[in-house]
Image (tube, grey):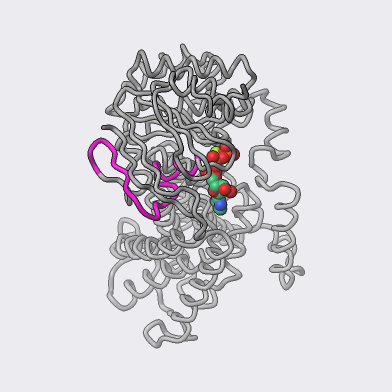
Amino acid sequence: MLLDVSDLSVAYKGVSALHSVSLQVQEGELVSVIGANGAGKTTLLKAIVGWEPAASGAISFAGDEVTRMRTHLRARRGIRIVPERARVFTHMTVYENLMMGVYGLQNEVQVGERLDRLYDLFPILKERGSQLASTLSGGEQQQLSIARACISKPKLLLVDEVSMGLMPRLVDQVFELLQTLNREEGLTILLVEQNALASLKISHRAYVLETGDIVLDGDAKELLADPRVREAYLGV
Amino acid sequence: MDYLVNVAIVISIQAIAACGLNVIVGYAGQISLGHAAFFGIGAYASAMLTTKAGLTFWGALPLVLLIAAILGFLLGLPSLRVKEDFLAITTIGINFIVEAVFLYTPFFGKALGIGGIPRIYVFGQRLNNQMLLGLCLFFLALTLLICWRFTRTWAGLSCFAVRENETAASSMGISPVRAKLSAFVIGTVFAGLAGALYAHYVRFISAGDFGFPVSISMMSMVVLGGMGTLWGPLLGAVILGILPEVFRPLIDYRMFLYSLLLLLMIRFQPGGLLGEHSFVRTAFRGLTGKEKGGVAGV
Ligand SMILES: Nc1ncnc2c1ncn2[C@@H]1O[C@H](COP(=O)(O)OP(=O)(O)OP(=O)(O)O)[C@@H](O)[C@H]1O
Ligand SMILES: [Mg+2]
């Protein structure tokens, strides 16, 4: 078990946003969490990276409990996130942004090799390497954010709503890319999405989150066929 | 001539302190309105060690820098808990406390301050003002070199990342605590160095030399020149060092003018004269046709 979230509750100023959520991700899996606005998807990821403290419950990563560990220490163990709205460092160049992704790992990661691989996937990042990240379009920033999170070859990649702000063609490309990273590089991914159809299509398993509770979970193919999911999230 | 040398010495000393402040404010994005406290701590430490403990300037200097570093580390600690406005107030508070300690403890000579601070010797040679200027310029060059190097180290990059987005930075394995503390320590060490040079230049110091207005003028230098740029603090120190000499009659309005300048800069050129979108940089770009970006850009 790579990631084991058990009975996790998170509250904002006493108002509960996640109630006893349990979720597991095995190594090599691509798992998605789908849910409507405000369901608590981002909150779940924030708790896993350590941006929000757990009110109760436990989070273990690769066999060790990390529930109270600070964010940067979790990151060093191999958890990376593509956050909501990309959050690239706009005052840094594209290249500098990518370099921040290997902070502290310069000796462990074959940086040149990783860059070549990522430039293959996102040619725009090579072209714009010396430009400030603020000059990239929203979709390009999203690509930079993904590349920055992947460059260190993380053990677990958390992805929060990558499809937001991307044009439909790019959305397909990004989901394809996540699938490639998962299938070819063996990258374990936990994907959080409102775009249920696209994410279920590439996932092995999925969880459905509704106002802080996991109401359904199972094989992604089965969920795609589930009438409740179809009605609530696929609009059919 | 001697007058010019004196002005230049003061400017270079202030530029060293301003470069230090720039590491804290510009590179790490932490507000500090109490930088003069560390300038004072450097000055008093060097003055005490040379007059009371009988050390030479050079013998005292490592200790002075160490004291500044330790106190900078301690000042950095509140920055981990409080943000923006509170940090501004906390650092102002630190400035007043340090000034009060110098002013009211007999150990530091109370209102009389400390006199009889020895001149600096280099190779057995007593430095006159011209030579002292040379030494100050040497230290200024060293300061700029270290700042420039710092922007190219991982520690420097992590400061920039934390300044821009602490949460995002932490998810890349950067410890915001370490980044901020390293900036505070480097910044206060430069302030301590400047303070030591100042003490051995004026050779008589008192608490008033290190009050809150001095912190404001240092901050003005950084903001005017361009926060987070390499040369900005130096440019700011030169401009604010020369202006009062040129406009002697306005000296009483100095604080008012500094405040006005700060407001105008923040309104019209928030990046400072050498900042990313400043008219100076735009003009320079127009001249050279060269585009330079990124945090490591000077
Ligand atoms: N910083 C915060 N302070 C207070 N309440 C918050 C905060 N962040 C989120 N919430 C609340 O917690 C709940 C879950 O929010 P969360 O951002 O996790 O939802 P989400 O599933 O990611 O939604 P979306 O699809 O819109 O991104 C919401 O009711 C939200 O209002
Ligand atoms: Mg969200």
Magenta span includes A48 = yes
Q: Nearer the viewer, residue A51 or B69?
A: A51
Q: Do we see residue B173 in this rendering?
A: yes
Which image quadrant shows ligand 2? top right
Q: In this view, which residue lies farthest toward the front? A: A227
Relative to A171, say whether A206 is above or below.
Answer: below
Measuring 56% from the left and 68% from the top, which residue is drawn there?
A: B89
Report whether A166 appears left or right of B103: right
Report whether B185 appears left or right of B34: left
Q: Quadrant of residue A231?
A: top right
Measuring 73% from the left and 64% from the top, which residue is drawn there?
A: B257
Tell me the quadrant of the picture where the N terminus of chain A can be found. top left
Q: Position of residue B62 (x, y in %)?
A: 30, 60
Q: Do we see residue B2 in this rendering?
A: no
Q: Nearer the viewer, residue B60 or A146?
A: A146
Relative to B10, say whether A109 is above or below.
Answer: above
Q: Position of residue B240 (x, y in %)?
A: 65, 57
Q: Nearer the viewer, residue B286 or A15?
A: A15
Tell me the quadrant of the picture where the C terminus of chain A can be found. top right
Q: In this view, which residue lies farthest toward the left? A: A63
Magenta span includes A157 = no
Relative to B271, say whether B246 is above or below.
Answer: below
Q: Quadrant of residue B213?
A: bottom right
Q: Position of residue A85 (x, y in %)?
A: 57, 34
Please give the range of residues in magenta. Answer: A41-64
Relative to B52, say whether A209 is above or below.
Answer: above
Measuring 71% from the left and 46% from the top, which residue is drawn there?
A: B269
Measuring 61% from the left and 58% from the top, which residue is drawn there?
A: B4
What is the number of callouts on the image? 0
Q: Position of residue B211 (x, y in %)?
A: 55, 73
